[in-house]
Image (cartoon, rainbow, N blue to C red):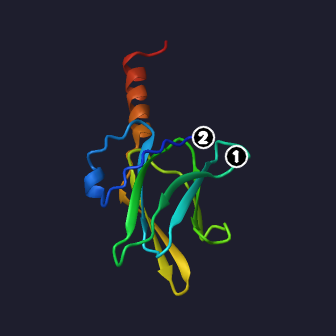
Amino acid sequence: MICGLLVLSLGLSTLRHVAAVKLKYDEALLTANNHLLQPISLLVVSDYCYKCLFQPLMTLQPAQSLQPTNRTVILRTQFELTIHVVTEGGNGEPVCSWKQLYGEHGHYIISVQPNNGSVKCDNHVSKSPTNNLLRKCLRYALHLKMNPLT
């Protein structure tokens, strides 16, 4: 069971094409770029899920010539996620691993690249997430001001 995760594989080449994707409440967009000459898989587990095993998030084919392959998924943003990148044909150990709480409506890019005989994973934000919690708190405070409890 994948806790806190909704996967929609788009397989698009750039984030310009995914701008049309309408993210719902508690969702973020994650794009992975594979610059390696071998396939990679991203595995995920939610911190919400106690003692759960890593589940496949996406698999990316090897880079073609100098052009990386990429894939995009929609993630749930309610809980922190741990993501592992594993190479096909490896020993199953992650070449990169990180834990992150993805923000609502944020767009994130992971770039997996060769780095002097090893693998380097760059993780950055291409569109900042919205802070809907702040908006909800302000709306609630305004409601309390207009409708006092006493």
Front one among 102 and 92 = 92
The residue that appears at 66% across and 66% down in the rendered structure is: 92
Q: Compared with residue 18, is residue 125 higher up or lower down, i.e. above or below?
A: below
Indicate the amino acid at tag 2.
Answer: Cys
Total numbered labels placed on residues in the image: 2
Indicate the amino acid at tag 1.
Answer: Cys
The x, y position of residue 103, in whole percent, is: 45, 48
**What residue did someone put label 1 on?**
52
Q: SS class of the residue under badge 1? A: loop
Front one among 88 and 79 = 88
**What residue did someone put label 2 on?**
3
The x, y position of residue 138, in whole percent, is: 39, 33
Q: Which image quadrant is residue 147 in?
A: top left
The x, y position of residue 106, in whole percent, is: 39, 50
Q: Give me the C-alpha separation between circle 1 and circle 2.
A: 9 Å
Label 1 packing within 10 angstroms: few (<14), some (14-19), many (20+): some
The x, y position of residue 21, in whole percent, is: 31, 44
Drawn side of residue 111 relative to residue 17, left or right: right
Q: Compared with residue 118, is residue 122 higher up or lower down, i.e. above or below?
A: above
Q: Which image quadrant is residue 79 in?
A: top right
The residue that appears at 63% across and 40% down in the rendered structure is: 1
Q: Which mark is residue 103?
A: none
Q: For the view shown, which residue lies furthest in the right direction?
A: 51
Q: Which is nearer the N-term, disc 1 or disc 2?
A: 2
Label 2 packing within 10 angstroms: few (<14), some (14-19), many (20+): some
Q: SS class of the residue under badge 2? A: loop
Q: Compared with residue 116, is residue 130 higher up or lower down, i.e. above or below?
A: above
Mark 1 vs 2: CB contact within 8 A: yes
Q: Compared with residue 74, is residue 61 higher up or lower down, i.e. above or below?
A: below
